[in-house]
Amino acid sequence: MASTAVALVGFAASVALFWYVRRDAKKKGVPRPLLWAVVAGGTAAAGVSLYAFVPTAPTTGVIMTGNTGLVLYGFEREVVLEDEGPAEPGELPGGPGSNGE
């Protein structure tokens, strides 16, 4: 019974994650928003499936599987939103004295 409840809540969360990533990718101009939504939601659903239906799956593997798509999307989002200005020696991007004030 508990694994069924976990599976239902987890799959609902995976669908919500799919919807959120797709909306966010469109809003931020990330290329291929549907692909990133499938990657993030699909890996989350795979992690939930491992947790709910494979009792011998190690917890660390379940967590890593569930988080992989969201982490990869976060990297892609950061690259797309990155400032394209030239680096100034001795200054951090967006720090004091830079053009990003």
Image: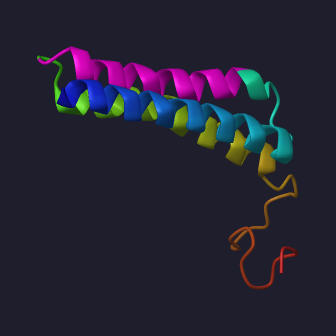
Which secondary structure dominates the residues rendered in magenta?
helix
Quarter of the rendering containing residue 31: top right
Report whether 30 appears left or right of 38: right
* Highlighted magenta segment, given as a residue range: 35-55
Which residue is painted at 79% across and 43% down in the image?
80
Q: Residue furthest left?
A: 56
Q: Quadrant of the C terminus?
A: bottom right
Image position, residue 61 (x, y; %) = 26, 26
Quarter of the rendering containing residue 94: bottom right
Which residue is painted at 55% across and 27% down in the image?
41
Q: Is residue 101 visible?
A: yes
Q: Is 84 inside the magenta-drawn segment? A: no
Image position, residue 82 (x, y; %) = 77, 52
Image position, residue 33 (x, y; %) = 77, 29
Which residue is painted at 52% across and 21% down in the image?
42
Quarter of the rendering containing residue 74: top right
The image shows a total of numbered marks equal to 0
Viewer-proximal residue, 2 or 30? 2
Q: Is residue 72 visible?
A: no
Q: Is 49 inside the magenta-drawn segment? A: yes
Which residue is painted at 63% across and 21% down in the image?
38
Measured along the vertical axis of the image, is residue 99 above or below residue 52? below
Q: Residue furthest bottom?
A: 96
Measured along the vertical axis of the image, is residue 41 above or below residue 87? above
Q: Quadrant of the N terminus?
A: top left
Measured along the vertical axis of the image, is residue 23 above or below residue 40? below
Report whether 69 appears left or right of 93: left
Report whether 68 appears left or right of 27: left
Viewer-proximal residue, 97 or 32? 32
Image position, residue 20 (x, y; %) = 66, 41
